[in-house]
Image (tube, grey):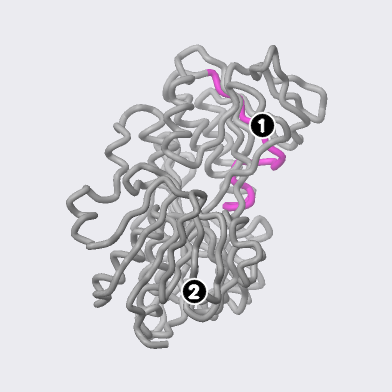
Amino acid sequence: MTRPDTVVIVGGSAAGLATAEALRRQGHQGELTLLDAERHLPYDRPPLSKQVLTGSWDASRTHLRSPEQLASLDAEFIDGESAVRCDAQERAVTTATGRVVRGDALVIATGLRPRTLPGQERLAGVHVMRTLDDTLALRCELTAGRRLVVVGEGVLGAEIAASARGMGVEVCLAGFGSALLQNQIGDVVGGILTRLHTERGVTLRLGVAVDALADDGGRVCGVRLASGELLPADTVVVAIGARPATEWLEGSGLTLGDGVECDACCRAAPGVWAVGDAASWHHEGLGRRLRLENRTNATEQAQTVAANILGANRPYTPTPYFWTDQYDAKIQVHGLPTPAAETRITEGDPAQGRFVALYREHGEVTGVLGWNMPKQARLLRQEHLAAGRNGQPSATAGFAR
């Protein structure tokens, strides 16, 4: 494919903006359009569940770029218009207002949509957290003495619980797993994190499913568990995961599974690419399809997608990475640890709040986790999950296929 004269990016958050900036840095001088459903300046999502929720940051601090920096991109920003249809062959996107935007190249960066519980949209006091507006609405309800129930024991649910406790809110967290972040960091470190939350005053109800939301005159008043127990609540946050926001792509001609299915270069169809949380691509190092939901991937994948739009044809082979901050714990995870992996503490001491853990499956290291030991975790990442000869992060070394 020749270099495109016009590029349309659907989704104006971290992945979409990073793609636009990378295109300009790498020499794209043609037209550039960013279509975004939100009306805010592009902003960063990780601070939402922490600094913005607690009020330690004003919402403006989440802005990824200033208005002047955005203007320097020489791009057209179409804000407040949701994409509702796509014709992949024509690389044409139709918005909810009927506007049609076409490009020689199309990039899909529409991210995720939170999963919900049945009936929650009919009840006041029930929240999800994906957007800045979601966070600000939740913050308005969280005052000291309020009773918050968080449904979901993953990264987002645990971060919200930790932030709310720091605000003096009475917090109960319910989840189906037996430990916090069990699917992401396994039982051993998940158990350590679970104990930390208990020590900080979070009431935990783990290992039991949520049956329903209880209401009182149209407002939530509790969460009923499958065991029959009712968890009283003034406010509820549902953090049970998210799904790729790809419903608008039905009938587009693209292959949709767990996200927009792409090849190793993140190409979904001729002239069409996907990036960020909504992109499912073939990872050549792992020999499998992968989709990552984290901020680091959004930025790194954008660099590869931009290069490929301009003709590079470069496979995307990152070493997966995510982090989470809860209380005074900064947890950094390299690779793909699973609950089935053998977990061993190799440095430090959990009792001192600083350690590194290695994860092994079938005799190979599949992940490295640092708990307040970022330097040591990076060194072990380099040793066990090393970069390839071309300097690109590679998951080949140390990963079970």
Q: Secondary structure at mark 1?
A: strand
Nearer the camera: disc 1 or disc 2: 2
Side (left or right) of 26 relative to 272: left
Q: Which residue is mark 2?
A: 272
Residue 392's x, y, as percent?
38, 78
Please state which amino acid type lies under the numbered disc 2.
Val
Q: Secondary structure at mark 2?
A: strand
Give the quadrant of the N terminus. bottom left
Give the quadrant of the C terminus. bottom right
The one nearer the camera, 255 or 212, is 255
- The reply to whether the magenta stretch includes residue 367 is no
Report whether residue 359 is seen.
yes
Q: Which residue is found at the position 39% from the left and 60% from the top? A: 16
Q: Quadrant of residue 202?
A: top right
Residue 327's x, y, as percent?
43, 34
Q: Which residue is mark 1?
A: 174
Residue 87's x, y, as percent?
56, 69
The one nearer the camera, 9 or 384, is 9
Q: Which residue is found at the position 63% from the left and 41% from the top? A: 240
Give the crowd class for mark 1: few <14, some 14-19, many >=20 residues within 10 Å. many
Q: Which residues are magenta?
A: 170-186
The one nearer the camera, 344 or 152, is 152
Residue 293's x, y, as percent?
52, 56
Q: Quadrant of residue 238?
A: top right
Give the mark nearer the N terminus: 1 vs 2: 1
Q: Is residue 2 above or below residue 360?
A: below
Report whether residue 297 is seen.
no
Q: Which residue is found at the position 71% from the left and 25% from the top? A: 213
Q: Which residue is found at the position 59% from the left and 57% from the top? A: 248
C-alpha separation, residue under disc 1 versus residue under disc 2: 40 Å
Q: Is residue 317 above or below residue 41?
A: below
